[in-house]
Structures are given as C-alpha cells and as structure tokens.
Amino acid sequence: MGLLPRRYVDLFSRPSVRAVVAGGFAGRLAFGFLSLVFILLVHQKTDSFAAAGVVTAAFSLGLGAAPLCARLIDRFGARVLLVLAAGHALALFAVLALLLDGAPVVPLVFCTWCAGLFLPPVGPVMRSIWRATLEDPDLQTAAISFESVTMEVVWLIGPLLVAVATATGGLLVLLALGPVLTLAGTTTIVVAAGHHLGAGAERRGSAGRERDKLGALRAPEVRLLVLNAFPVGICLGCVEVAIAAFANARLGPAYAGVLLATLSIGGITCGLAYGARAQHRRLRTRFLRLTLLIALLVALLAATGWLPATVLLLIAFGGAFAVTLVVANQLIGEIALPGTVTEAFTWQTGMLQMGVALGTTIAGIAAEHRGASAGFGAGALAMLIAAAGATYLVRRARAAVQAAPAPAPGEGGARVLIDDGSPSSHQG
C-alpha cells in the first residue's frame, strides 16, 4: 500500500476518529448552506434583497462570539458544546416559525443573530481533539489536513443542496434540516471524544483569572498568527470576487460557480496529499514559503487573461491555500497555551472570515473600475503583507533559538526543538 493511503488508514483505524469525523461533517454541513437559505427565503417572504441582506448579516455578526464560546468549551468542557447546539437549534426553529407566520424583519434579525451566536465551533473543537488524542505528529497532520478537505466538501455540497431545494420548493425543509444535522453531529463528537474537551484547562487563582481576560491571545505568537490570518482572508475574498468578475466578462455569469469549484478541486487534492506526506517540522518556514507561493499565483492570475492558464492557476491556488490553512492550524495548535487551544483555533478562523469580508469589498470596488485583474492584484498585495508577517515569525523563532542558553556540561548535548518546529539536534 502506497504512502498516500497508509497514513489515513492508520488514522481511520481508530473507531473514535471515525465517529468524530462523521460527527464533524454532519455538524458543519449546515454552515455550507444556511446563509444562502436565509437570503433566498427572506427574499421570497419580503420581496426585498435589502431585508434578506440584513437578516443574513445578523447571522454573520452572531458568529463573532465564537472565540468566547470556544473559551467556555476550553474551561468547562463538552457540556458547553451541547448547550450551544441546543440554543442554535432553538433559534433556527424560531426562524422557521417566523417565516411560516410571515413575521416582520426585526424578530427575524434577532433570531438569526442568535443562530449565529450559538453555532457550535465544530472545526476548532475537532482540531483541539486531534491535538489531545493523537500523539503521533504524522497522524495529527493527516487529521488536520482532512479537516481542510472536509470544509472544501461542505462548501461544495452546501450550494448543491440549496439548488436542489430551490428547484423542488424545499427551502423550508432544508432550513429545518440544518439544526438536526448540527445537533446530531455535535452529540456524536461529545459521545466519542467529549471527555478530551476542557481537559487541558488549569485551575487558576485570582491572578490567573486576571491574565485569562485575554485567553488564548495571552501568547504573543498566537496574537501574531491571528493578525496574520486577516490579510490571508483578504486575499481569499479578493480572489473569489475577481473570479466572478472574470467569468462575467469572458464567459458569462453562469460560469462563475464552475471556476470557483476549481478552488475546491485543488484544495481537496492537495489537502489529502499534504496530510499523507508532510512532516511535522519547519512549520514557520513552510508557512512563509506558502504565502509567497500564493502571492505569486495570484499575481499571475492578474497578469493573464487566457482561460486555460487561469483554470490551472486557480487549481494551484486552491491547493496552496488549503495547505496554508493546514500549516497555520498546526502552528496555532503548537503554540497555544494549555487550556486555550480551542479558543486559539477559533480566533484564527474568525480573523480569516473578517479578512474575507473586507477582501470581497476591496475586490468589488477594484473590479468595478479596473476589471478582474485589479481584484486579483489586490489579493496578491494582501498576500505579500501576510508573507511579511510570516517572515517576522521565522526571524522571531531564529532569534529565540540563538538566545537560548547552551546545555549544561554532562547533559549529553541535549537539544531543543527550535521555535519553527524543526529539530535543532538530537539527544545524545
């Protein structure tokens, strides 16, 4: 059996892993279609895209509380995850009832905000579980890579479900299915591995509680990585809008979805390959090289208008971007303080989403006046900013290694792991 399948075979040979992965997929599937369902249903009921936009924006605003929810999970464990899933389900069923009753927009806004507020941070929870349960770094890499692939699949299946539901008049049914999937998925995760959630939290005195006001952000490198996720998200948002502008100008608006799908093709392929072959070392250097590669790919997208080259570059971009997110997740898991891992993952994801929101705005303005190339160019510039942040992370790690005291005589030349995750030496 080749190297590609073997690591995944080893990973999925564990029953608890299979259960957590299945629960994670079910628990996140609704995230791939809820926003679009809100837009379509509210527009049907109100005949107003403005109202639909406000309701959907309220859902996105509610998601901003994810780091706080993750902090509660880190401190109190799996029971918080179940409470969140139940609250999310109640909020969505309230939205469903309001839509059936023809209620005004204001209560819809409140209930969709609550649905976002209580949405369980399933992805960060799963990455926290992998850190706690998989001692083999190679299996951790495979698990986190598979997480990236799972999200790519969610983003592929979600819009397809909406298309089928729209064609069959089943949007309300799909909305009702969302909380059922989330409840089933989170319950499966809690049953299979819930005892690992919150296990790393330390009992702290009053001084510790004062420091805990920053939570995961107390770690300087976590703050750096979280901030660096912002320009990475801007780049992704720019590329998505620039793809739509390119399709509209060259092929027709219907082809925008086809071109966007090429990102997932690259992401799924490279995500699986990375998880099967990558070594758990030199993460900071790898992160820097990937950010530079993405900046180059997006710059080439800005420079070319030839369709075959654009498709190939988009596949490469999707692959490189997926691997970059895997490496960033590996890094955040390594440097997060004990008892803050889930929260740290959530901060990174949230900052990425904020960047995407700004990137779509920037690229929309740029593409409106200068075409798709300007949107791609803005994305390349954002990724260069991310590369500058990655360069600082690498230099900070090297400076820490150089400043480390030499081993005392008689310690056999014991070496430490350098800050970028690569072994600087072996124990004698």
Image: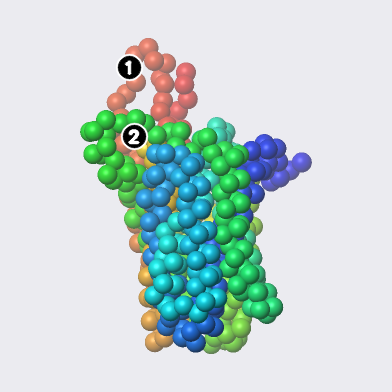
Q: Nearer the viewer, residue 60 or 14?
A: 60
Q: CA distance from mark 1 to mark 2?
A: 16 Å
Q: Amino acid at mark 2?
A: Val
Q: Is residue 167 above or below residue 334?
A: below
Mark 2, Cα crowd under 10 Å, few <14 / some 14-19 / many 20+, is: some
Q: Is residue 206 above or below residue 176?
A: above
Q: Nearer the viewer, residue 147 or 313?
A: 147
SS of the residue at dot 2?
Answer: helix
Q: Does label 1 or label 2 sit earlier along the sequence?
A: 2
Q: Position of residue 219 (x, y in %)?
A: 32, 42
Q: Amino acid at mark 1?
A: Ala
Which residue: 53% across, 70% down? 97
Q: Position of residue 309 (x, y in %)?
A: 59, 74
Residue 142 seen anywhere in this rendered image of the structure? no
Which residue: 50% across, 69% down? 95
Residue 177 seen anywhere in this rendered image of the structure? yes
Q: Nearer the viewer, residue 103 or 226?
A: 103
Q: Position of residue 384 (x, y in %)?
A: 38, 63
Q: Nearer the viewer, residue 56 or 262?
A: 56
Mark drawn on residue 179? none
Q: Residue furthest front?
A: 101
Q: Is residue 427 above or below residue 319?
A: above
Mark 1, Cα crowd under 10 Å, few <14 / some 14-19 / many 20+, is: few
Mark drawn on residue 401? 2
Q: Is residue 52 above or below residue 90?
A: below
Give the position of the N terminus as an image quadrant. Answer: top right
**Residue identifier under label 1:** 408
SS of the residue at dot 1?
Answer: loop
Q: Position of residue 303 (x, y in %)?
A: 48, 77
Which residue: 53% across, 87% down? 249
Which image quadrant for residue 361? bottom left
